[in-house]
Amino acid sequence: MSSSNGNGVKVLYIGGVGRSGSTLLDLLLGQIPGFFAVGELKYIWNRGLQENQLCGCGQPFRDCPFWQEVGRKAFGGWDTVDLDAMLELEDSVDSHQRLPVLVSPGLSPRYKGRLAAYGDVLHRLYAAVAEVSGSEVVVDSTKRPGYGFVLRRAEGIDLRVVHLVRDSRGVAFSWNKRVQRPEVHDRVEYMPSYSSFWAGARWTVTNALFHLLRACGADGPTVRYEQLVREPRGSLERIATEALGHESAPVRVPGDADWIAGHNHAVAGNPLRLKGGELKIRADEEWRTKMGARQRLVILLMTWPLLLRYGYLGKPRAQG
Ligand SMILES: [Zn+2]
């Protein structure tokens, strides 16, 4: 395992369940001087290189000058990458079925070899992003716990994790809605939606895995979505300081004079990254008035221990 002693490329990983505001946090962190947001980099191989989906700058991935330069620095050009072999390697290390192997302390020599090979690829990729963007910290909002464990075990990557949590009832309500993926420009495709039971189970397991990743030595702050949207500046300052290990340059939020609207090179992730223009931060609390009693009860019964731990039940806490 790599250690968090300051060696290697600094990667700030946003971990948590989908629909927790991770793309918003990614875009906000990406505007801090010295930070660069890449979106959900796990999906660079399939959604970027294979399907040529839209980058956050609005261009198809293969036409984006930033990613072309990263490809050159990391691998001598994307054309030198054997995509089929890469997708196979990724799948053999970090698919849903591999998760139990990935989080266990003892790894087979064969799996260790594949993990080292994939870790080497990721190290080259993140180092190239840091170099081309001229940044100190690369922000990745892939969110998935498995990929967090991969990064934690990769040599040459100095990992910090922001564990982003959101009230399970808000997440479940959002998961029930159908949202179209605008980055898929040649057909209609929707983001996944889940039943109440699966939403509750997924929320609990995902968050629990981030507690396990913490126990495996991945340091960093825990941030509540509701606190982030209420008080973005304070939340960002706290995350940036913990990620760097020292105070960051002043953070920017939408509305500040030096805020740069609508510019990013995020790969995959929520439709928000493609909107451009002024980014509006507002709390999505629709579930409080529109969520059905039955769904609310199912989610509450399934998720109350962690809801309690994060301070969502009982008296509201001042700290997020
Ligand atoms: Zn781009």
Image: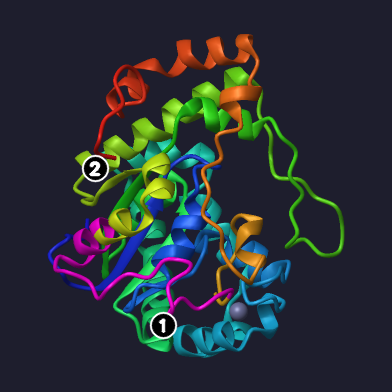
User: Which residue corresponds to the image point at 21% horizontal and 51% vertical from the top-left?
Assistant: 219
The front one of 241 and 61 is 241
Q: x and y percent of residue 182 in the render?
A: 75, 59
> Nearest the camera: 161 or 221?
221
Q: How many marks?
A: 2
Quarter of the rendering containing residue 317 = top left
- How many residues crowd mark 1 within 10 Å: few (<14), some (14–19), many (20+)? many
Mark before the other along the chain sequence, 1 or 2: 1
**Relative to 291, is 9 above or below?**
below
> Is residue 254 shown in magenta?
yes
Q: Which colour scheme is used?
A: rainbow
Span of residues in magenta: 238-262
| Circle 2: residue type | Arg
- In the picture as drawn, the residue positioned furthest to the right comes out as 187
- Picture coordinates of residue 22, whole percent (x, y): 48, 51
Question: Which disc number belongs to residue 213?
Answer: none
For mark 1, give the secondary structure. helix
Instruction: Residue 160 in the image: state x and y as whole percent.
Output: 27, 57
Vertically, is 159 above or below 190?
below
> Residue 45's quadrant in the figure?
bottom right
Q: Is the magenta stretch mostly helix, strand or loop?
A: loop
Question: Which residue is nearer to you in this view: 61 or 317?
Answer: 317
Q: Are marks 1 and 2 in contact (CB under 8 Å)?
A: no
Label 2 sits on a secondary structure element that is helix
Residue drawn where x is 21% and y is 43% of the image: 216
* Vertical order, 254 against 145 (above or below): below
Q: Mark 2 points at which residue?
A: 214
The reply to whether residue 170 is in sight is yes
Residue that numbered label 1 is attached to? 128
The answer to if 10 sits in the magenta stretch is no
